[in-house]
Amino acid sequence: MSEAPETSQELSEVLEDLRRHLLWQEEDGGRVLQVDARLAAELRGSALRAQMARAPAAKAAPAPAASPPAAAPAAAAPAARPMASSAPAPAPERPLAARAPQQMPARREAPPESLIEVPPRVRPSAGPLPGVVDGERPMLDDIRRELGDCRRCKLCDGRKNIVFGSGNPRAELVFVGEGPGADEDAQGVPFVGAAGQLLTKMIEAMGFRRDDVYICNVVKCRPPNNRNPEPDEVAACEPFLRAQLQALQPKAIVALGKFAAQTLLRDSTPITKMRGNWREYEGVKLMPTFHPAYLLRQPAEKKKAWEDLQQVMKFFGRQPGQRG
Ligand code: URA
């Protein structure tokens, strides 16, 4: 008898997890949804069967509905904080070591892969980070001021707006993308186009709100025709990204796509090999995963990305259904 609630809880968690996954699969025209709906039915059936087998007399304890989120233990959830765009409020000092106490799992080395194209190694520019004085923790608005009306690379020629970053200046979780597209260039805000809408769903499926986290890109100006950023452009912008991360001092970073992962980690391993394995950036946990624009083109890969994001949720002590 006493096993029934435990099974119900498991069932509830499985279904909530599935529901969150499905939330950001909606735009796939139903193809993935149909597969997942079958899976959901199977899961529901097998969990119920398990419940029946384990608690044959538990007719009075039906399985809980899938939709209500599981109760959230408040302890692990970071407090809601104000959102900032390019002129964020000052953040208090938080020593990096104190903010990332978790042990990094052993790194799995990827074998060399000759069939997958590896872009040229990005060379970061040497020297102190912009807006960073004597290695001290900088402020985001000092870095933005330092960036100014940037003319450090050719991307300045075609841009409408510099897309510096947006979100919570005290975010514990930071998402780093590649570079602005047309919508982001027009609005001066990262990830507001189609890929951005998917990213927002991914963030919400993780139990965060978009304004809990901070979102920025490797390059701050739109590459023409959405081409890939070139190595000199990445090199010109990378110090600003590194300075932003030094200002934010997050607990974890999600690197979206190969440019973010390869630039931050200084590792040219293909994203297909890197994704899903915790890495470390300057003492901060970093999870490489697929870029949302890639997921829009390859919806079948969303399952893998969701697995990666679930690892990040676990790091933050979040269960499916738990809100921060
Ligand atoms: N893709 C990115 O990498 N960044 C954006 O801001 C938008 C799309």
Image (cartoon, rainbow, N blue to C red):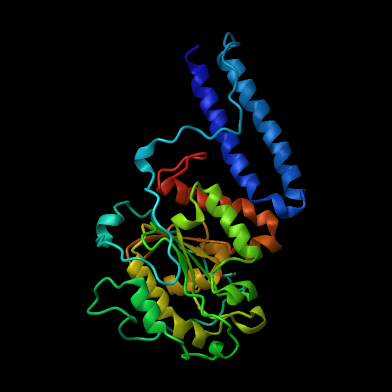
- Residue 144 in the image: state x and y as whole percent: 40, 78
Q: Position of residue 294 (x, y in %)?
A: 64, 65
**Residue 83 placement, left or right of 43:** left
**Left or right of 209 on screen, residue 87:** left
Q: Residue 86: x percent and y percent?
A: 44, 72
Residue 79 visible in rendering: yes
Q: Looking at this rendering, what residue extends furthest in the left direction?
A: 134
Between residue 280 and residue 29, name the one nearer to us: 29
Q: Quadrant location of residue 242?
A: bottom left
Who's the residue at 25% across and 79% down the image?
133
Residue at 59% x, 44% y is: 20
Q: Quadrant of residue 273?
A: bottom right
Counting labels gives 0
Q: Residue 150 placed where, x, y %?
A: 46, 87
With respect to residue 126, does 16 lie above or below? above
Residue 277 seen in this snapshot: no
Q: Among all residues in the image, which is located at the extreme top? A: 57
Q: Quadrant of ligand 1?
A: bottom right
| Quadrant for the C terminus in the image | top left
Compared across the picture, whether 84 is left or right of 129 comes to: right
Q: Which one is in front, 111 or 88?
A: 88
225 sits to left or right of 139: right
Residue visible at 50% across and 74% down in the picture: 268
- Does residue 36 sit above or below 67 in this rendering? below
Of residues 141 and 58, the one drawn nearer to the viewer in this rendering:
141
